[in-house]
Image: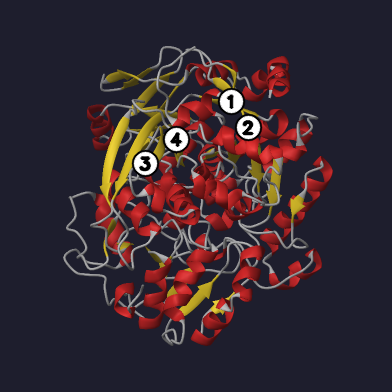
Amino acid sequence: MNSRPKTLFEKVWEQHVVVPETHDIPAIIYIDLHLIHEVTTPQAFTLLRENNLKVRDPKKVLATMDHSTPTVPITSLKDLDIVSEKGPAEQIRNMVKNCNDFGIELYGFDSDRRGIVHVIGPELGATQPGRTMVCGDSHTSTHGAFGALAFGIGTTEVAHVLATQCLLQRKPKTLSVNLTGNLNSGVCAKDIILKIVGDIGVDGGTGHVIEYRGNTVSSLSLEQRMTICNMSIEAGARAGMFAPDQSTFDYLENRPMSPKGDDWVKAVNKWSNLVTDDGAIFDKEVDIDIDALQPMITFGTNPGMVMSIDAEVPHHNGSQSFKQALNYMKVESGKPLLEKPIDVVFIGSCTNSRLSDLQDAADILKDRKVDSNVRTLIVPGSQAIKAEAENLGLDQIFKKAGAEWRESGCSMCLGMNGDTVGEGKLAVSTSNRNFEGRQGKGSRTILASPKTAAASAISGVVQDPRIYGDK
Amino acid sequence: MEKILKFSSTTINLPNEDIDTDQIVPARFLTLPSKEGIGDCLFYDWRFDKLGHPIEDFVLNKPEARNSSILVAGNNFGCGSSREHAPWALVDFGFKAIISTSFADIFKNNALKNGLIPITVPEDIHKKLLGNEGLEVAVDLDNLKLETELGNACSFSIDPFSRYCLMNGIDQLGYILSQELEITNYETSQ
């Protein structure tokens, strides 16, 4: 037997090799679960039809609609034309047809489990340790929080996986991000990942799978781990992973698609081996001090342009791109962003739309009002989270504060169907990308945690959540 | 798929670093049902003003852009979203190769499946190209060699399998489908 110490990633990879990699040909790896949504699949289904191919195993496909769905209430496709723009409406109808034609179960408008694809996977228990998962969406890295190997693919590859349940892949390298210390009050998992992306850069993880390790990890909830894994792609990484532990098992137990009875016991036994062996070697390592971490915000037009909330915008390094970013954002080097007036706050997206994120926001918004100049949009990650939040009365806290409370979906993260920041307007957003125009044409985005976003909504300016006596 | 062996073209430059796929094709165009014509959306918000009129000094609006099939771009081209609409739009516009000092992983994978060659070059060649927009550059996929009309040359690397598929006009799906027995064996062993 081969006793060489292995990383978590290597263990999951090796268990899924169908045909080993050679110099000439990449490995064929097996995909346990394929997540699909309406935006990156139409041309893949066209390719299947053109080649007279079937979906190899429809049961290994989890389908929902999230990217271009409206976030105002609708219960059936009939309502779509009233509330939706034409392009997205057609795309949504097309998704329903494709799933019907190919025998794939769809969590559509009639399902109370519909939601953002990276939120419902874990919620349903479909995301499990040791699984390989792909989706035509770069934030598929989210599922690595459970010790799954999960990454984004293009539409051609979506067709490959639909037709064969397999993918051609070169084995990526490994990067260990060592987190030490504990989160201070007012500081969130979002701040951890913004710090990491800032430190290693938007291409610091290119070609690598990150494993998050260190003594901080055991104290992080699965929802916090998901936020961190979600934005691994913002550092260019193929995927991010946490080794499964007792918190992982507790999260998954009794979920609709989790193993039950004896199968559960067997699964936990198997999953418990999914840890990096002592002495395993990573291609790269990076250390991040969590004790010293402050709330973080972005100041530019990529997620690596970050700083502590009370810092001043850095002086540029002479690069034209840096200068263009500051011009676009209308910010100046040497000046703080704290107290800068804002127009919009968005709390949502696959990064920060889970119940704990909404609770973080509600803790600050409770018995307070959002500034009258700020539009505040709060969008739960799934219909199930929406229901849970409403059971807890969070929707009432948000509405009383003057925020909009919506149906689940990607919403203002990418502005595909009505929810946009507005030309030239400045948003504090809990989403994952501050690219030019990401939240609608001409939008300007400051990425932040749900706490920072909520505090900014109340203040009407970029605000440090710690002034609201946050826990 | 068209076979690609070698080609040459003048270059145009987009030296910005970290060009993300939201710039290459903004999200609001992702509802287009097919790949045809998507080149009209390429770099839309950099190419057109608020009224939809072309911004004259943007490089893709210059006449020479229509005759060029090689884009020289800044480091880490294609970061962000996995949208394959990005390479589709670049190809539909007429590009056959992007030259940079590095590419984001998903973009690179997507590009290679659409006949668009991501060419990583050393910094000195990159600088030379950025400093001499419009240079004639020859790309030789067979010998993995790039050469400028000034005589600067370098080799580049492409995943051997992608290169084989590009040179023979083969779709990668055919290869995976041919491994049916291996896939079934794997499934039964689980």
For this rendering, which residue is in front, B108 or B99? B108
Residue ID for mark 1:
A16
Amino acid bearing label 1 = His
Query: Disc 1 vs disc 2: which is toward the camera?
Result: 1
Is disc 1 on the same chain as disc 3? yes
Q: Residue at x 24, y 33 (%)?
A: B127
Q: Secondary structure at mark 3?
A: strand
Q: Residues within 10 Å of mark 3 (few under 14, many from 20)?
A: some
Question: Mark 2 to mark 3: distance in Å?
Answer: 25 Å
Q: Residues within 10 Å of mark 1 (few under 14, many from 20)?
A: many
Where residue A280 appears, as percent x and y from the top left, is 36, 26
Residue corresponding to mark 2: A31
The chain that hosts pointer 2 is A
- Check if mark 1's residue and mark 2's residue have beta carbons within 8 Å: yes
* Vertical position of residue A457 compared to residue A11: above or below: below
**Numbered disc 1: secondary structure:** loop
Q: Position of residue A430 (x, y in %)?
A: 44, 64
**What residue sits right under mark 4 in the picture?**
B105
Select label 3 or label 1 by which is in front.
Answer: 3
B79 versus A367 height, above or below? above
Q: Position of residue A193 (x, y in %)?
A: 37, 52
The earlier-in-sequence mark between 3 and 1 is 1
User: SS for tag 4?
Assistant: helix
Quick check: do tags 2 and 4 share a chain?
Answer: no
Q: Which residue is mark 3?
A: A213
Say which amino acid is labelled 3: Arg
